[in-house]
């Protein structure tokens, strides 16, 4: 987005309808207390009609990143010939009414008596995926959320790479599959079988659709993005100096209506961090997740949060969103695509080249061993590992300052490139 604060303010009268009162922070958040800094104006905007689309809106992005990236790479299987696939568990059938592209998809189902649904395809001569990342179009019908795994036998079951992603029910999504587990020493120049699985554990039914399995060129090197939700004070007091000592930038998901509270990053601190290369991105958290909000409220919340970032000088990060609670639905993805190029969820692990930019997965950095495993995969397979933090205090389940520093030291040891949302986007936006 190339909109300056001056041009935004000049256009705002035509697009925005003034201020609305908000009844404080979201549920469970302590009340704000006075700080030594001067009060920071926090405008709260609304539409006359929040259901309007983004046409002509100065806050809208230049293009829909999901549409631009949806078919990146080359086709591995289009699921037009169901005879190529077999079943290990559960069942599959041809589906002609719910398709991502082409004439059909495959519908995968497990009953409550099944532990999983699991299909596979063999490649007699093997295929070379050593320089490629996989993505799979998935549409989840039931349950509301679950994990999808894809196993590569390379060349046999003693040498496998397990890929995976977590998904919410939200229409068709392209899952950028990242490594989760390695068995043996897989030779990705000779992949002889690809299998797709959803494990339910039994007791619940599952139904989802798969289409358009694609491969795309793998990045030349691994990278890591260090993200922080909720603009909490310890991110400035503790995490920022540790990252500065390594010359690393970070990404803060800002809840605009909390800025000015004593337990949040001070407004001057946000400016300081941005001067050091950090991004301040949107994190429009309400008491309800975006799976509960109406489409009109989703649009109003997403737009209000971005407007605050632009008006307060954080244009660089305003084109990116961290999903509150990591939850979204189909309408939320549609709205976010009007205003943001990248969106980040709460789970998913490291990922390869991006083909659904609104659902980039992250790894919980509070678990140091899990974080290091994601970083190892990023280094080994040239993936993007996005680490997620909230507080850096050691209180509750939050990571301690020492453990956080240990992880950052490990990033330095691995030699991973540390990126922000904006720098990563700049590196990929014109690649297709």
Image (cartoon, rainbow, N blue to C red):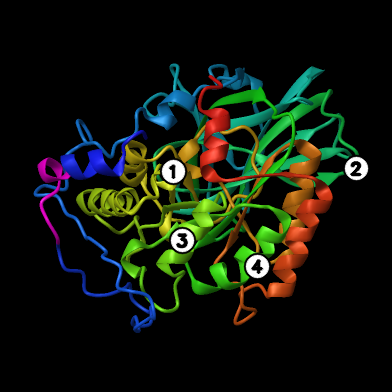
| Between discs 3 and 1, the one toward the N terminus | 3
Q: Which residue is mark 2?
A: 184
Q: Residue at x 60, y 18 (%)?
A: 75
| Contact between labelled residues 2 and 1, with CB atoms less than 8 Å apart | no
Residue numbers of the magenta segment: 12-19
Callout 3: SS: helix
| Between discs 3 and 4, the one toward the N terminus | 3
The Cα–Cα distance between marks 2 and 4, rounded to whole angstroms, is 28 Å
- The percent coordinates of residue 422 (x first, y second) are 51, 41
Q: Which residue is mark 4?
A: 366
The Cα–Cα distance between marks 3 and 4, rounded to whole angstroms, is 23 Å
Callout 2: SS: loop
Q: Is residue 419 magenta?
A: no
The Cα–Cα distance between marks 4 and 1, rounded to whole angstroms, is 27 Å
Question: Which of the pair 311/56 is nearer the observer?
Answer: 311
Say left or right for 389 vs 411: left
**Would you place residue 428 above or below residue 32 in this image?**
above
């Amino acid at each position: 987005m190339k909109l300056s604060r001056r041009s935004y303010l000049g256009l705002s009268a035509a697009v925005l309808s003034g201020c609305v009162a908000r009844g404080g922070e979201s549920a469970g958040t302590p009340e704000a207390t006075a700080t030594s800094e001067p009060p920071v104006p926090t405008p709260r905007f609304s539409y006359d009609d929040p259901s309007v689309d983004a046409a002509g809106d100065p806050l809208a992005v230049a293009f829909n990143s999901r549409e631009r990236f949806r078919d990146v790479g080359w086709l591995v299987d289009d699921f037009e010939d169901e005879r190529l696939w077999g079943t290990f568990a559960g069942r599959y059938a041809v589906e002609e009414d719910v398709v991502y592209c082409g004439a059909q998809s495959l519908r995968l189902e497990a009953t409550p008596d099944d532990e999983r649904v699991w299909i596979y395809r063999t490649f007699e001569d093997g295929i070379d995926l050593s320089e490629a990342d996989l993505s799979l179009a998935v549409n989840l019908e039931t349950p509301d959320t679950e994990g999808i795994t894809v196993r590569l036998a390379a060349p046999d079951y003693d040498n496998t790479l397990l890929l995976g992603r977590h998904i919410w029910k939200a229409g068709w999504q392209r899952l950028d599959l990242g490594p989760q587990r390695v068995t043996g020493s897989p030779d990705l120049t000779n992949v002889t079988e690809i299998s797709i699985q959803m494990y339910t554990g039994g007791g619940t039914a599952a139904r989802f659709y798969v289409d358009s399995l694609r491969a795309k060129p793998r990045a030349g090197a691994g990278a890591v993005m260090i993200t922080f939700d909720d603009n909490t004070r310890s991110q400035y007091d503790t995490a920022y100096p540790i990252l500065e000592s390594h010359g690393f930038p970070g990404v803060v998901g800002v809840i605009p209506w909390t800025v000015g509270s004593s337990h949040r990053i001070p407004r001057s601190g946000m400016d300081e961090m941005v001067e050091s290369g950090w991004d301040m991105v949107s994190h429009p958290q309400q008491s309800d997740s975006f799976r509960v909000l109406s489409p009109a409220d989703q649009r109003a919340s997403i737009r209000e949060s971005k407007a605050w970032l632009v008006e307060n000088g954080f244009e660089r990060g305003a084109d990116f969103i961290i999903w509150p609670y990591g939850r979204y639905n189909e309408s939320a993805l549609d709205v976010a695509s009007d205003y943001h190029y990248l969106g980040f969820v709460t789970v998913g692990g490291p990922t390869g080249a991006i083909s659904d930019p609104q659902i980039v997965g992250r790894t919980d950095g509070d678990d140091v061993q899990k974080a290091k495993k994601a970083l190892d995969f990023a280094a080994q397979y040239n993936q993007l590992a996005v680490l997620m933090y909230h507080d850096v205090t050691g209180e509750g389940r939050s990571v301690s300052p020492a453990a956080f520093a240990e992880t950052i030291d490990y990033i330095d040891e691995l030699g991973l490139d540390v990126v922000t949302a904006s720098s990563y986007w700049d590196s990929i936006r014109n690649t297709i």
